[in-house]
Image: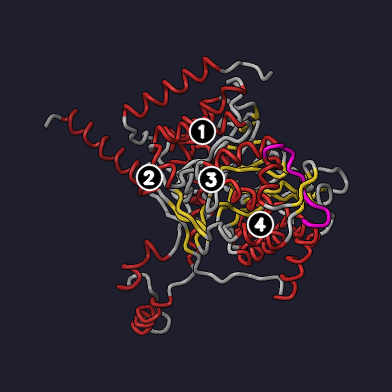
Amino acid sequence: MSEIETKRRGRGVRKAERTKKSLRFLPEADRGIPYIDLLNEEQVARIHSETINLLWSKGIEFRDDEAAELWKEAGADVTGHRIRIDEALLSHLLKTAPEQYTLSARNPERSVTLGGRKQILTPAYGAPNVLDLDGIRRNPTIKDFHDFAKLGHMSPAMQMSGGVICEPMDIPVPKRHLHMLYSLIRNSDKPFMGMVTARDRAEDTVEMARIVFGKDFIDNHTVMTSIANCNSPLVWDQTMLDAIKVYAAANQAVLFTPFVLSGASTTASVIGSLVQINAEALAGIAFAQIVRPGVPAVYGQWIGAVSMKSGAPMAGTPEIDQINLLVGQMARHYKLPWRCSGACTSAKIFDAQAGYEAARNLYGAALAGANFILSTTGYMEGALCQSFAKYVVDAEQAELTHKFLKGIDFSELDEALNAINEVDPGGHFLGTKHTLENFERAFVIPELMHHDSFEQWEAEGASDLNSRAITKARQMLNDYEMPKLDESVDEELLDFIDRRESELPDLIS
């Protein structure tokens, strides 16, 4: 073998090793730590009772004629779009919603289960701005979207590639969903989220999923978990209801998420907000069961406390942790999978505020037992910006969260005690058989958090976390390799996109 061939072979081996490392995949966390319940049994019963009272006495609006007619046929009291639901009907409908479900990926090794004690972490959603690798805040492009999808594919603790990770402003709104969905499918083989901003966009999403998985598979398996926001207080609007009808009919899961600004769209009270959130989410889940009994449906909320000085939403406050703990307890009461948001921040740059707020939110969501933790990575400015640097740091923190959720393995005690007996007082454990056999898996060692001495840090360039994260993101994108997708499937997807683009306008009418 020539010297050039040897060098090429060496580079190939090194690249393969880097790729192998980056393509580690952590399945759903199987929760090994106890839940924290803030309410006693009587208080849970009171919240349930007040929820039923709200849904029956005041009612909730489903602002869609078709939805109102479906509720009427199901036995609700319907006046125009105002729906009143009694306890018997609500309980009947909720019984068909599964406690957990499997989210199938196009690569079966990436499929995950959520519900019960199973928890997954997923990227942030919906940002109209990005903080790019040059530190510039700007509108996103489809290339940015591709890059975030690639980072999601390569991040071990991201169990989904994402949904609307950012809004690619260089593509017309009526056609944008096609390119975002193709990116999620093509750049990753993990599960993905669907598009919900118009009925035809949800229908296109289902059709593209059928191309990838097959119509029969889709009808019997859930491959998407999309998001539908209740327009709090107490309104499900036509746009969201149209998407819910499409996805529920196709056996695809929806996150029923009241979008709550506590103090603005709910009362300025954590416990008061809980009653409204409970009513809104349960009504949405019940409606999905009318469309298709047994379809997976996820209970949950997005909540931000409102600053009474400015009216701006605040992230990282203790009230958010409290509401997550309360919502989690109610979800377990109803035996429903549930969601909340993770590493959220109101910070404008990746600074100490971003770190503190994101850590509090993510840790609180983990403790609360959320089965679907959305917005784990990249979230800035109260969801208005997606940061590349924060994305990779958050993704690493998600790995630490995954380890924390597993709890402890008590079966390790006997071996550890043997090691203690081997070491004399004043000795050390660095060279013991137990340490050598366990050090690689005993502790998570973050790559981006610098734990060496000041002198070592200075010798390595004295870089801050933001700089290290940007370097890491560039490296990951450089090392990225596109997962396999059958060529005929890829061609059919592209043909579908071409046809739909020819049918859709560039502007919203």
Q: Name the residue tied to disc 3.
A: 225
SS class, disc 4: helix
On the image, the x and y values in percent for residue 235 come to 76, 44
CA separation in Å, label 2 and label 4: 28 Å
Q: Which mark is residue 360?
A: 4
Res 228 → quadrant: top right
Contact, mark 2 vs mark 4 (Cβ under 8 Å): no
Q: Is residue 3 visible?
A: yes
Please determine whether, in this image, residue 463 is positioned above or below residue 96.
above
Query: Magenta region: which residues?
Result: 55-66
Q: Is residue 400 visible?
A: no
Quadrant containing the N terminus is: top left
193 or 409: nearer the eye? 193
131 or 343: nearer the eye? 343
Q: Mark 2 vs mark 4: which is more N-terminal?
A: 2
Q: How busy is the neighbourhood of tag 4: few (under 14 within 10 Å), some, or many (20 plus)?
A: many
Q: Single out the mark in the foreground, 1 or 2.
A: 1
Specify the amino acid type for callout 2: Leu
Classify residue 344 as left or right of residue 26: right
Specify the amino acid type for callout 4: Arg
Q: Mark 3 vs mark 4: which is more N-terminal?
A: 3
CA separation in Å, label 2 and label 3: 23 Å
Q: Name the residue tied to disc 2.
A: 23
Q: Name the residue tied to disc 1.
A: 205
Classify residue 323 as left or right of residue 159: right
CA separation in Å, label 3 and label 4: 25 Å
Specify the amino acid type for callout 1: Thr
Q: Mark 3 vs mark 1: which is more N-terminal?
A: 1
SS class, disc 2: loop
Residue 62 belongs to magenta span: yes
Residue at 31% over, 27% down: 487
